[in-house]
């Protein structure tokens, strides 16, 4: 297969190219829907392309599920739930989930390459973060399958039934794992819809599920756009909706489900504050800022897109940050040297450009390192805005790109009130040498996860989720299991 070309970039640093091989990747020209253990074509017969955002070349085409397909998938999940999965011994369920985890590990290289091809993220991230964490989630929840009584002492659990699950494009396989693993461990069956721009690793996961001999209908994977997602949410035989995506669609789902009795969890947008105190280890903090906002092109719900630096060290931090931005390697997602890959889609690139224009019009001072971007594909340079204030739109609204808004502060109370001043509450970061400050700030910031002297660290045992408009419910850990059971 030769569907990508190595891209050339002018950066201040030059490394010899180290592209990951794609010769052994087998992608089909066309994928059907994975329903009841088989790949079938959609009832409507429509297909759409999924492309490589680094060069805009078509990778494959996938089916667009219509209402009849969604119904067929939900019915398959219902049958599998009633007849097989809910009746199976929990220890047996656990074995299937372990098997999925092990096969993902065996095929980790293929998964990582396909993730980077389809979504544009650097291979280093898909190889070292997305895929190992996805396998880790299946391992973690496999272990819970026969220990549910210990997860909720003194209570017994009842599975919910069929879960309709909808995921975004920024961590495609990982989000699928976050959704499928706890649902299966708790005895539910699922219908999962991946995002339109990144369906390929979910479809490869369907192949893994078949290889693991998971009974037909326990996991169904249907591709399509927002309309397909809507149909899944509305289907009367879905008992629980698990959604990860934008706050806007999350609100729509909440309204749609009101009064239906269906359970739901919503993992939505964010606008995380990363706070640097004058007593922090500055070099370490600068590396943390880079990780927090430029990692995965800023396509991270918990990205540290707002930076608050204590006034006395602001000059030093900003100067070191600019130096570091100049050394970031933007380019071929499949090259192991790449720090910043391709923007996921043209639509997302346009959104980033729109917000950067707004930032300039609002009076922010922009800094972007100089580099030449290729003509084909979707790219954006890491961008920093200083001289902004709390009321600016680029400080309040989620951009979901590599754009950082910097403000300074003088006191702990001031920065806590600024950090809390957005509609979101998903994550945050604090950098200081003083434990007392860490405890005060982490306690008073209204966010689901706050990292101290680090950023973007994940573990299947830790719950994740938002306050305010960042969502409802938790995924990961025992809390994530709780989202898929009724306690009786
Ligand atoms: P999105 O537009 O909300 O889409 C998310 C998923 O929902 C996609 O599969 C999408 O399908 C589908 N969808 C769209 N409209 C729908 C509708 N009316 N009903 C049901 N499903 C619908 O979000 P996105 O732009 O893909 O993803 C970025 C957002 O996700 C950001 O806001 C980010 O913060 C958030 N996110 C949150 C977390 C978290 O854990 N809190 C994690 C990752 C991402 P199509 O893609 O095919 O249109
Ligand atoms: Mg794609």
Image (spheres, helix red, strand yellow):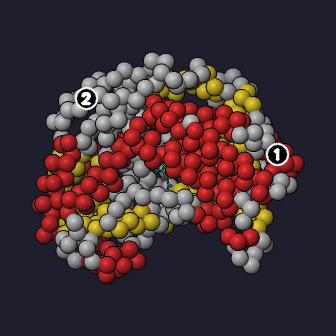
Q: Which mark is residue 80?
A: 1
**Which numbered disc, 2 or 1, marks the residue that appears first in the sequence?**
2
Quadrant in the picture for residue 310: bottom left
Q: Is residue 447 visible?
A: yes
Question: Nearest the camera: 189 or 425?
Answer: 189
Question: Nearest the camera: 187 or 410?
Answer: 187
Question: Nearest the camera: 160 or 210?
Answer: 210
- How many residues crowd mark 1 within 10 Å: few (<14), some (14–19), many (20+)? many
- How many residues crowd mark 2 within 10 Å: few (<14), some (14–19), many (20+)? few
- Estimate the x, y position of residue 214 in percent, counting from the top left: 75, 42
- Estimate the x, y position of residue 218 in percent, counting from the top left: 76, 45
- Cα distance, mark 2 to mark 1? 52 Å
User: Image point 45% across, 30% down: which residue?
Assistant: 117
Q: Is 381 above or below relative to 275?
A: above
Q: Is residue 392 left or right of residue 319?
A: right
Q: Which mark is residue 16?
A: 2
Location of the C terminus by quadrant is bottom right
């Amino acid at each position: 297969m030769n569907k990508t070309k190595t891209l050339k970039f002018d950066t201040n640093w030059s490394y010899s190219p180290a592209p990951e091989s794609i010769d052994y990747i087998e992608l089909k020209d066309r994928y059907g829907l994975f329903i009841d253990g088989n790949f079938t074509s959609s009832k409507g017969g429509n297909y759409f392309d999924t492309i490589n955002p680094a060069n805009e070349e078509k990778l494959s085409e996938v089916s667009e599920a219509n209402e009849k397909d969604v119904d067929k998938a939900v019915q398959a999940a219902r049958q599998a739930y009633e007849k097989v999965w809910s009746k199976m011994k929990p220890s047996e369920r656990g074995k299937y989930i372990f098997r999925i985890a092990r096969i993902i590990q065996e095929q980790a290289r293929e998964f990582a390459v396909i993730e980077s091809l389809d979504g544009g993220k650097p291979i280093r991230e898909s190889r070292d973060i997305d895929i190992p964490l996805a396998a880790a989630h299946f391992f973690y929840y496999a272990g819970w399958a026969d220990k549910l009584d210990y997860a909720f002492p003194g209570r017994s659990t009842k599975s919910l039934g069929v879960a309709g699950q909808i995921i975004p494009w920024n961590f495609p396989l990982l989000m699928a794992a976050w959704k499928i693993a706890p649902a299966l461990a708790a005895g539910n069956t699922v219908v999962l819809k991946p995002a339109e721009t990144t369906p390929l690793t979910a479809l490869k996961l369907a192949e893994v599920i078949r290889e693991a001999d998971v009974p037909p209908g326990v996991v169904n994977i249907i591709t399509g756009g927002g309309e397909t997602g809507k149909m899944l949410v509305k289907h009367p035989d879905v008992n629980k909706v698990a959604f990860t995506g934008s706050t806007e669609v999350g609100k729509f789902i909440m309204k749609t489900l009101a009064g239906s009795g269906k359970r739901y969890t919503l993992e939505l947008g964010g606008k995380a504050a990363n706070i640097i105190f004058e007593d922090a280890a500055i070099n370490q903090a600068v590396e943390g800022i880079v990780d927090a906002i430029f990692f995965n092109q800023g396509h991270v719900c918990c990205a540290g897109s707002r930076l608050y630096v204590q006034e006395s060290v602001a000059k030093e931090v900003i100067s070191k940050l600019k130096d570091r931005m100049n050394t970031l390697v933007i380019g071929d997602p499949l090259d192991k040297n790449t720090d910043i890959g391709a923007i996921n889609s043209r639509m997302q690139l346009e959104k980033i450009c729109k917000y950067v224009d707004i930032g300039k019009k609002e009076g922010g001072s922009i800094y972007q390192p100089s580099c030449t971007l290729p003509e084909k594909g979707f790219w954006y340079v890491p961008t920093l805005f200083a001289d902004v204030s709390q009321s600016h739109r680029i400080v309040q609204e989620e951009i979901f790109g590599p754009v950082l808004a910097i403000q300074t502060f003088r006191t702990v109370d001031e920065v806590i009130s600024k950090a809390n001043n957005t509609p979101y509450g998903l994550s945050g970061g604090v950098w200081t040498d003083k434990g007392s400050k860490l405890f005060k700030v982490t306690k008073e910031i209204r966010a689901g996860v706050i990292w101290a002297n680090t950023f973007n660290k994940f573990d299947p045992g830790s719950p994740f989720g938002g306050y305010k408009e960042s969502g409802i419910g938790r995924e990961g850990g025992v809390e994530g299991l709780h989202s898929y059971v009724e306690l009786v």
